[in-house]
Image (cartoon, grey):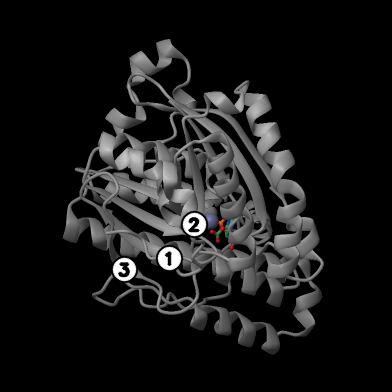
Amino acid sequence: MIILGIETSCDETAAAVVETSEKEEVLVRSNIVSSQVKLHAKRGGVVPNLAAREHLKNIIPVIEASLKEAGVPPQQVDVIAVTQGPGLIPALLIGVNTAKTLSYVWKKPLLGIHHIEGHIYANFIGENLKSEILSRVLGTKQEEIKFPVLCLVVSGGHTQLVFMKEHLSYEIIGETQDDAAGEAFDKVARILGLGYPGGPRISIQADEFKKRNTASTITLPRPMINTSDLNFSFSGLKTAVLYLTKKNIRKMRQKKFIQEVSHEFQQSVIDVLVSKTIRATKEYAPKTVMLAGGVSANKELRAQFERAIKEHTPHARCVMLAAQYSGDNAAMIATAGAYRWQHMNEKQRKSYYNSWKNLQADANLILPS
Ligand code: KG4
Ligand code: ZN
């Protein structure tokens, strides 16, 4: 089965073609992402109406390129999956309305996908096992990921611990009370004069400090690390960085100071994320633990998360997604669409041929339970 995925919830215009194999493994045939980062960097963050204008300009060429690269003509597409929400409404509308038009003209079923469901299903992409021989030796992602699953979702808009008893079922067992982890990275990067997007830039600065192999002289708080719940808070940490920089205005010109603050800030976020995930594994006893969302591209987070799961939860296995699918992309949306389609009966499937009539972009879409 062939699924065309479309994603325009924020500042990436993305389209991808995935194919499900006989073993229900999802293979990526093309994954095109046209990033608007340069445009928004000048303004220090994403401007929704500008994002929408760029999506409008890019959406058709990006979809065309994804079909061409996959070698798939429109008539071979079985299902279209599009990000329905949450996200910036002017941006979402471009993807949703394009998908609705294609669904109507091509007479293909259309699925609206929750953006976070997409991020979670990036873990089920089996591209790294593309070779048939390799996949026979290693098994498929389907076999590797055993339920129940615990997923730490860390993106620009969300920080959530999501518990999944089975496919497509989500229970949010912890979440941020204020800023998301990615948002904190972006805001702290702005305070430190590193620009947008903050996450990758802070990570580079933190690496420079690590290379020096000296102990940190700065200590930032680890908010909520000892609370008995599974929630997070990052806004106080950002304020702590702001006060620290105000107290050290002269040092702000020194590269070494910026590197040290970046390192301590990143470590504080990682400590809290890892510690709450371990706490959740004790309460919920998952068989698989995973990461998802843009912040999961962070090298240190990936390494420390994997190490901590191995050390503290011998009964759970950590499955790490390929970093190329951490940030916003359409392969993850198509993959979630593939699993949704696989779990439907014929009658349900039929109804989606008409969903172009009423599918609505929803900036505040709730993750289905
Ligand atoms: O999932 P995503 O691409 O978009 C949303 O759904 O929000 O996540 C974007 C977020 C941004 O806040 C960005 O700064 C952060 O992910 N990010 C990172 C890294 N790469 C992207 N944060 C920390 N380290 C990184 N390497
Ligand atoms: Zn995202």
* Residue that mark 3 sits on: 174
As rendered, which of 335 and 132 lies closer to the eye? 335
Q: Which residue is drawn at 73% across and 54% down?
A: 56
Q: Which residue lies furthest to the top in this view?
A: 133
Q: Residues within 10 Å of mark 1 (few under 14, many from 20)?
A: some
Residue type beneath disc 2: Gln
Q: Residue 73 carries which label?
A: none
Q: Does residue 202 appear anywhere in the picture?
A: yes
Q: Which of marks 3 and 1 is nearer the N terminus?
A: 3
Q: Which residue is drawn at 75% across and 71% down?
A: 44
Report helix, strand or loop for mark 2: strand
**Towards the viewer: 69 or 121:** 69
Amino acid carrying mark 1 in the image: Leu
- Residue linked to disc 1: 365
* Rendered view: 246 above or below 104: below
Q: How far apart are marks 3 and 1 (CA)?
A: 18 Å
Q: Earlier in the sequence, mark 2 or mark 1?
A: 2
Q: How far apart are marks 2 and 1 (CA)?
A: 8 Å
- Of helix, strand and loop, which one carries label 3? strand
Kindly tell me whether residue 336 is visible in this rendering: no
Reading the image, the residue beneath label 2 is 84
